[in-house]
Amino acid sequence: MSAKSASEDWAGERIAKYLARAGVASRREAERLIEQGLVTVDGKTLTTPAFKVTAGMDIRVDGTRIGAPEAPRLWRFHKPAGLVTTHKDPQGRPTVFEALEGRLPRVISVGRLDLTTEGLLLLTNAGALARRLELPSTGWTRRYRVRAHGRTTQAALDALRDGVEIDGVAYGPIRAALDQTQGGNQWLTISINEGKNREIRNVCRHLGLQVNRLIRTAYGPFQLGKLATGAFEEVPGKQLTEQLGRKVCEEIGL
């Protein structure tokens, strides 16, 4: 055991951080679970995310015992339309995590795809890795294939390169190409770096287009490729190290 890990075992680790490293939820989501009274340690319900836990404690979330955090892992998942990216949906809609139950360890998503969006969704068992991959500072491009009803031109799409403001929301540079026209629809390839809420749908609506199919094909260096709908595949640790760098991997325990 390293000196660092020995020190952590002795002093303990905040429960929210522990649950994030165990892949239960992000730290913020873990705090909400604690507020809801769903987290217990040695049979006692926690009331604060500042509580420190140590090896050997009986830690449970909604009655399920949580084991020691594993090494960070990452999967590519081809999300089908009709699933929400949340662990529990108040409206009772089917979720990504219900669809994967029993097929993967407990995981969280890197960002989200909305109900009707398809394509590449990254999943990880480590909150620290999820946060790192979501950081805008990575500069990673999110690429989408878009089918939209209506008509636009390449010139109108080129005008998005400097960003655009819509309903008071400023969107950063957007790279878009008009690929094909089919009947009343057009197929576009759109690349963004920020990934604000409903960004592509809002930008398309600004251009007079109504999105009726949205497929994410890439998140930074990770590609959807030929992964079948509903299928998942683990990203090799070597590839993660190459993309994140050894220093970052050491920070997140990879």
Image (tube, rainbow, N blue to C red):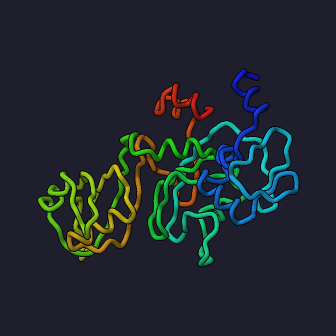
Up-down: is 69 above or below 186? above
Quadrant of residue 235 within the rendered picture: top right
Residue sitting nearer the eye, 44 or 173: 44
Residue sitting nearer the eye, 21 or 48: 48
Judge from the rendering whether residue 117 lies leftward or rightward of residue 67; answer left or right: left
Q: Residue 247: x, y in percent?
A: 52, 26
Residue sitting nearer the eye, 49 or 176: 49
Q: Residue 134: x, y in percent?
A: 46, 47
Q: Can you name the residue that lies furthest to the left here?
A: 155
Quadrant of residue 92 within the rendered picture: bottom right
Q: Residue 191: x, y in percent?
A: 31, 52
Q: Residue at x 14, y 62 (%)?
A: 156
Q: Residue at x 52, y 25 (%)?
A: 246
Q: Residue at x 50, y 41 (%)?
A: 132
Quadrant of residue 40 within the rendered picture: bottom right
Q: Residue at x 70, y 59 (%)?
A: 34
Quadrant (top left, top right, bottom left, bottom right) of the N terminus: top right
